[in-house]
Image: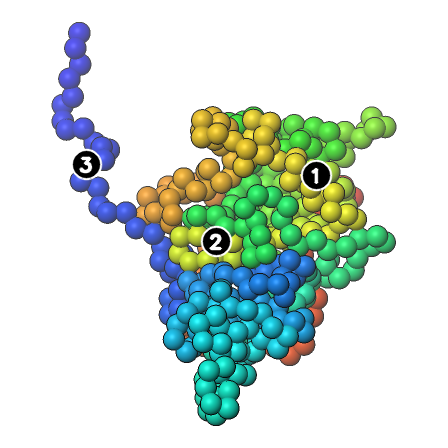
């Protein structure tokens, strides 16, 4: 018997309205709501160790083309790429002891944009003091060079973090990514910054993408890291708790760990994000109980369709960073070694996030209960935009002297004798 439809098909793609992205959250250029909010914060622009006085470096942050350099006296500087004289790029300039000199006519500027010399002008420029190269304030901390691109009258102190200051014996900070494509100005990915940042509040993607769909992609699973049961996508929904923190959003994921003595303990694996763009990750390779996180990642927007990643790791040696990078595999290879077919068969974060498009179309999303962390984070980002527009101070912008911030991230043994939350 042939069954025929009594009416027209529904749910087809025909006639759907044009899709759109949430411009308020994703667009970062000057004058945009999020762009103005992000300009109230400091952002990493270069690795301190890699930034030498050899040559200037071209970069782009928040939709602005910039040059970052270190002069011969060791001072870092950030100036506009286009020379204030006739517009040549200072990328081709020469770094000198007291500044950077344009290749075209020899005008020289210091790290605060002051014109020190106009080489081809009488008396080296009798009115050179009126020529100012646009510049931004910079400071160095934790192995990174930070830049502030917002209103001068609202410049906050550069934040501090306790876990990056209270170093143990033999520990150091490492702020360079030893992978192809990474350089002094970070590692660029060609899709919107929010697609990467909100991934940190999406724990269930690890269960499916990194373990079920593409096979085990973390070498520590089942050995020194979380056990295989941690990655069971069908048993995870009741093991995750999302919560607000003093500086952002976090979550706790419970799991059970078998100890060498035959006993089993319960533990939490807890990442946290600080608005506007910082990720605090526990060690997912060697899960050390009752210790905080050792990794801080900054997701810095380049423009609306790309972003840079910067990282600071607390470790006893650079080999630890190399081991972390080496432990993340797709089909037994590093992500930069994959063929296009292998990326299709064994996708990872870059494929899943980048395939959403240069800017994901938020009007086409169908959010579910497992997206709670993403929703909480987006609400906090909308709040900092609202605060800046209303003339209020947004979250995590301090005044006066900066005090070290504390994070809830880490791997912790559950205290079974402690009272239950809310009791």
Find residue 366 and name its label: none
Q: Earlier in the sequence, mark 2 or mark 3?
A: 3
Q: CA distance from mark 1 to mark 2?
A: 25 Å
Which of the two marks, 2 or 3, is nearer to us in this view? 2
Q: Secondary structure at mark 1?
A: helix
Q: Secondary structure at mark 3?
A: loop
Q: CA distance from mark 2 to mark 3?
A: 34 Å
Image coordinates of residue 281 in percent, x first then y, are 64, 48
Find residue 323 and name its label: 1
Q: Earlier in the sequence, mark 1 or mark 3?
A: 3
Residue located 49% across and 76% down the image: 106
In this view of the protein, which residue sits in the foreground, 382 or 319?
319
Which of the image's four quarters has the N terminus? top left
Question: Is residue 249 in sight in this rendering?
Answer: no
The answer to whether mark 2 and mark 3 are in CB contact below 8 A is no
In this view of the protein, which residue sits in the foreground, 376 or 364?
364
Image coordinates of residue 126 in percent, x first then y, are 48, 92
In this view of the protein, which residue sits in the foreground, 22 or 356?
356
Q: Earlier in the sequence, mark 1 or mark 2?
A: 2
Q: Secondary structure at mark 2?
A: strand
Label tally: 3
Residue located 80% across and 53% down the image: 171
Find residue 307 and name its label: 2
Q: CA distance from mark 1 to mark 3?
A: 49 Å
Question: Is residue 189 in sight in this rendering?
Answer: yes
Residue located 51% across and 68% down the image: 93
Residue located 34% across and 47% down the image: 361
Image coordinates of residue 249 in percent, x first then y, are 57, 54
Find residue 14 and name its label: 3
In this view of the protein, which residue sits in the foreground, 421 or 362?
362
């Amino acid at each position: 018997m042939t069954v025929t439809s009594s009416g027209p098909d529904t749910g087809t793609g025909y006639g759907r309205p044009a899709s759109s992205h949430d411009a308020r959250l994703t667009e970062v250029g000057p004058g945009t709501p999020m762009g103005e909010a992000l300009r109230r914060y400091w952002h990493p622009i270069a690795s301190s160790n890699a930034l030498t006085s050899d040559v200037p470096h071209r970069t782009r942050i928040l939709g602005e083309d910039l040059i970052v350099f270190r002069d011969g006296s060791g001072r870092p500087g950030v100036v506009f790429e286009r020379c204030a004289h006739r517009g040549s790029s200072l990328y081709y300039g020469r770094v000198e002891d007291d500044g950077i000199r344009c290749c075209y006519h020899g005008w020289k500027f210091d790290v605060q944009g002051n014109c020190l010399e106009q080489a081809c002008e009488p008396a080296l420029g009798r009115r050179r003091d009126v020529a100012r190269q646009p510049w931004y304030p910079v400071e160095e901390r934790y192995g990174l060079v930070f830049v502030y691109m917002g209103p001068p009258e609202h410049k906050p102190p550069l934040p501090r973090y306790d876990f990056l200051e209270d170093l143990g014996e033999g520990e150091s900070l490492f702020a360079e990514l030893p992978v192809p494509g990474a350089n002094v100005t970070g590692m660029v990915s060609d899709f919107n910054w929010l697609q990467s940042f909100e991934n940190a509040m999406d724990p269930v993607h690890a269960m499916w993408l990194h373990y079920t769909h593409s096979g085990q992609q973390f070498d520590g699973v089942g050995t020194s890291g979380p056990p295989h049961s941690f990655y069971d996508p069908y048993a995870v929904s009741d093991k995750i708790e999302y919560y607000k923190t003093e500086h952002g959003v976090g979550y706790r994921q419970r799991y059970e760990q078998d100890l060498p003595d035959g006993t089993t303990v319960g533990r939490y694996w807890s990442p946290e994000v600080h608005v506007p763009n910082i990720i605090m990750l526990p060690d997912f390779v060697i899960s050390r109980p009752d210790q905080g996180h050792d990794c801080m990642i900054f997701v810095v927007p380049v423009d609306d369709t790309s972003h840079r990643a910067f990282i600071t790791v607390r470790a006893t040696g650079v080999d630890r960073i190399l081991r972390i990078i080496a432990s993340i595999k797709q089909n037994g290879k590093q992500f930069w070694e994959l063929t296009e077919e292998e990326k299709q068969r064994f996708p990872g974060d870059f494929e899943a996030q980048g395939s959403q498009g240069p800017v994901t179309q938020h009007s086409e999303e169908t959010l579910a209960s497992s997206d709670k962390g993403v929703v909480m984070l987006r609400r906090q980002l909308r709040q900092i935009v609202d605060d800046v527009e209303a003339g209020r101070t947004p979250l995590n912008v301090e005044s006066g002297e900066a005090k070290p911030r504390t994070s809830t991230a880490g791997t912790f043994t559950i205290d079974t004798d402690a009272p239950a939350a809310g009791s």
